[in-house]
Amino acid sequence: MMRWKKTIRQTGLICLAAAWPYLGTAAELPKPVLQMDFEDTPATMSPAGVGQSLCLDLSSPGKEPFVLKDPELLKNLAGIKSFTITGWVKKPVTFDDVNNAPPWLLACPGVFDLRFDNWGGLALTMEGADKSRKKIRSGKMADADLNLYNRWVFFAFTYDGTKQGTNGAFYYGYESYLIRRDRALVDGLAGDLNLTPPPFLAIGAGSPDGKQKLQGAVDSLKIFASSKDGSAALGQVEIENIRRRDVGTNYLRQLELQALDDKRGKKMDLMRLEDKFWSAERNLQQVDPLTRIFSNKCPPPVSPDFVPCVPKGGSLPVLFAAMIQDAGVLSAQIEVSFFRAENGVPLQLPFTTYEVLPVPVEANSNGGSITGMDTRPAEIWMEHQVAEAPFKIAEALRETQEVRLGTARIRGNDRLYHGILLDFDIPPDTKPGLYRGSLTLKTAKGSLEKTFSFQVADVAVNNFPKLNNVYWFTANPENLTTRTNLPALWSEEHWGLIKNSLKTLRKFGQTGITINLVSQNKEVINYIQTCTAADGTYRFDYKLFDRWFEMFMELGFQQVEGFHLFRGQTGGIPDVYALDEKTGQKVQIFSIGSSADDYFRFLEIFATDLCKHLDEKGWKKNYYQCLIDEPANLELYKRAKGVADKCLPGIPTKDACGVAAYSDYMDVQVFNMSLAKQSYQDLALKRRAAGKSGWLYHCVTPYPPNPNRHLDDPLTSSRLYPWIARLLNADGYLFWAANNYRGADPYKSSIGLLPGGAAEPGHSPGDNWMYYPGPDGLRGSMRMLAFREGLLDHALLEQLA
């Protein structure tokens, strides 16, 4: 093992000297080639380093990176067979590009470098002796974690060139804990790194002159390297010992004691709540509609002076929690009365009563396609989730006049908390002022009553909602009902389920809907039937399409999106079936392996005929065409856009795509959270000036601490999304799944299944659905209720503007 042997006075290097209890091993830590703690160096700029030490702070203007040109050090950084880099970085949160060139943390030209990307992720790039270049990225978890809240983040990269297969790893953590390890396979780079010594080693920039400088701070940087064997690729225990030693004994103990105090404090708060509000055998309390009601944890009641305000023409949710300690199930009839406070006259405002059904959350969000019960997410994510799984929360809205209370078990000390929701519609002609009401639960063992108040403002919301929003809707019978005997496809019973479900979507503020066109598989049913005549020509049957479209328009939907004409991000050819008019049989005419040229010729025929049909019906003004979802093949997308422009004149195209390169070929570009970057804001405003629209979408991303709408996210996040859309100048909001269960029962499972039905791993809890099936169609959810409240906020903000 090599080590750079210089004194503290000359270089600012120090040796590890403090005693520390090692984890799982009594072996000494190896000595680093380079260790910089910046305690006694002229470059020290800030006293706020790791464990309250000093650090190299480059966040202020005029501060220069630390550059090392010592020949012995640089020689020892060449010809490396294995190495480990550990350190700490604190980088402010920003969505913006840094002069279109993200900052570097460490530059060792020709050998390796550490640099950030535009989202805060960190990557190690290495150059082999054979001039090959490979990366170890910080992994999916790093979109926000490596710049979270301007906190100190610990990182470690390891590489072992003596190994074939998995030969790299990335670790990261914080002062209080090591988070996780991502292993990496660095193909093509097994062996030594570049044999030529680098000209310099720069800390905090990409060059000695400060190019691509880090706008942040660095501390406790260490490099372990070996030109003989794989011993410098440290293991997880050694990495954790380094992290703990960097933090320091006393400071780490302070953090651990604080964490214990916080945990104890939360438990004590629950005990106080239970003693004060939930100690009786039968209890009923009003709670904030943004409060999650856990089945086994008492929720905090609203304060006595809680009086929500609602505009005329708006809606108002009033949420209650009940807890009855009777063994077994006790049914309760719901009665509601309310009156105007000024005169006490009873009123008849329209409202809907819901039982808020509990749903399970068996695993916390861990990212797309990697969430499962055996993959606990990082601690830093858990700080932003409502609870650690498994748990049950009140979520699905069952319309009813009777709720089922009690413990559901035969032990009187079991406590289960139940949600009851009153959802008021406030007519536009409602007189402003203070209103009071009461909720009464009548059971065979007595009644429970709770009063509530709300204020109707002297302002009316107009044209609600103002934010266009679309949730992709799945019309398969099994995705619409809890009935065991499913109705036949396109039977009148099936159409009834569709209509009831669409009414629910409209009730929660949805303005647009999707319609499938030509593709068909077990998860997708299409509404335009392709037919082939004896002479090989195509004809298209629009009977289902027309009924579908007419129902949308009747229910008040403003926008209909034709679903994608290609499969997947790379634009694969979908499954297309045609009805052979001669035999009466359906035959598959296109699939993934079909000729692209043949499919494009078919699309031109289909799109031309569809445009003619829409024109005849007068529906062109309401129709948009999607081409490829999150496209990853620009040339193919340009070709598809060419077909749309030629064959669907006057019909805008629309696709989810967070990549600027596609912007010129999209009429409506649906950005992801990249829209928050200044360069994308400039692009969106430029598009708007040219008459092109920009929307916002999300799915399993963004990751904590950014808001999302999974079952373990706070309900405030769902309410926040219309605010985010307005903040980012988005004209609309898109979510990919209203009810895409893929065979899952959302009352028994929360992990969103992948295509084909794989649930372990799957998507984050609730990511595949925002609505729940009921006997007669889809039901709403607390997430959708919070989103609708955000739509109301958005509409009022628009009126204020």
Image (tube, helix red, strand yellow):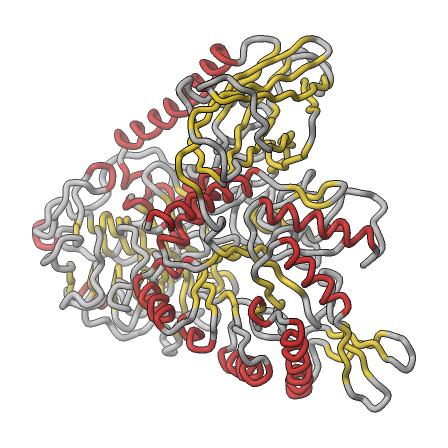
Res. 604 image quadrant: bottom right
Residue at (34, 25) in percent of width and height = 257
| Closer to us: 771 or 205 | 771
| Residue 199 falls left or right of residue 496 | left
| Residue 474 lies in quadrant | bottom right
Q: Nearer the viewer, residue 521 or 557?
A: 557
Left or right for 727, reference 342? left
Residue 199 visible in the displayed image: yes
In which quadrant of the rendered image does the N terminus lie? bottom left
Residue 347, given in percent of the width and then of the height, sits at: 56, 25
Q: Is residue 337 above or below residue 782?
A: above
Whether residue 449 is situated above or below residue 573 in the rendered picture: above
Q: Position of residue 159 (x, y in %)?
A: 40, 60
| Residue 232 in view | no
Question: Which quarter of the picture shows residue 282?
Answer: top right
In the image, taking residue 532 as reference, residue 708 lies left or right, namely: left
Residue at image point 25% right, 52% down: 221
Provide residue 546's location: percent of width, then percent of height. 72, 66
Q: Is residue 153 left or right of residue 280?
A: left
Which is more toward the observer, 56 or 17? 56
The residue lying furthest to the right in this view is 583
**Residue pictured at 33% horizontal, 63% vertical:** 681
Residue at the bottom extreme, as displayed = 535
Q: Locate residue 506, reporting x and y percent.
A: 60, 49
